[in-house]
Amino acid sequence: MNKEPKLKTFICEMCGKEFLTDGNRAKYCYDCRIERQKQRSRAYSEKKRNNEQVRSIGDTDICIECGKPYVVKSGSQKVCDNCRKQHTNKLKQKPNAEYSSRAYDYLRVYVPKGDKAKIKEFADKHNISINKLINLGLQMAMDKLKQSD
């Protein structure tokens, strides 16, 4: 039972043509992607020729978060291991907030002092979030009230 990949439509950032791919973040059509790779290779070679800073795996670089030196483990690494989680969370904050504002309404719930810890413990015990627990409780209450109407 081989599942066919779902093709998505994208618009090429270089030529503006529509193209289909099964990727999630495609920016360039096939022809422009090849050209873009050539441009990147030329730029990298030019940097090396001009003795500009070119990082290699194993080199030492400076963390953009804390300013301390670290050993480069991948080409896209910008932060040390200690700052990685903090840096990733910082990058996710804006997209997560934008998604939440589109997908959810905000509702503040007050609970009696001391009950918050009990609710959290109950939710953890049942392996669900407090938010899901509250939504489930609200849905159950609304269903019960509908039945009594």
Image: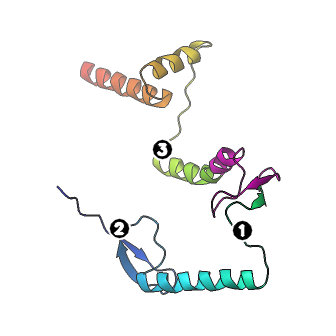
- Discs 3/1, front: 1
Q: Which residues are magenta?
A: 64-90
In front here: 148 or 143? 143
> For mark 3, what is the residue?
104
Under mark 2, the amino acid is Asp
> For mark 1, what is the residue?
55
Q: Badge 1: how crowded within 10 Å, few (<14), some, or many (20+)?
A: few
- Discs 3/2, front: 2
Is 129 a magenta residue? Answer: no
| Quadrant of the snapshot with the N terminus | bottom left
Q: Is residue 50 above or below residue 54?
A: below
**Residue 141 relative to residue 51: left or right:** left
Q: How far from the left and from the top, in percent, is residue 114?
A: 61, 12
Q: Badge 3: how crowded within 10 Å, few (<14), some, or many (20+)?
A: few
Sequence-first disc among 1 and 2: 2
Do residues under tags 1 and 2 come within 8 Å of each other at their CB atoms? no
**Residue 37 relative to residue 66: left or right:** left
Under mark 3, the amino acid is Tyr
Q: How far from the left and from the top, in percent, is residue 4?
A: 23, 63
Sequence-first disc among 3 and 2: 2
**Residue name at image x 60 percent, y 81 percent:** 40
Q: What type of secondary structure mainly makes up the magenta span?
A: loop
**Residue name at image x 71 percent, y 85 percent:** 46
**Residue name at image x 43 percent, y 81 percent:** 29
Kind of element beneath mark 3: loop
Kind of element beneath mark 2: loop
In front here: 117 or 148? 117
> For mark 2, what is the residue?
22
Q: Is residue 118 above or below residue 41?
A: above
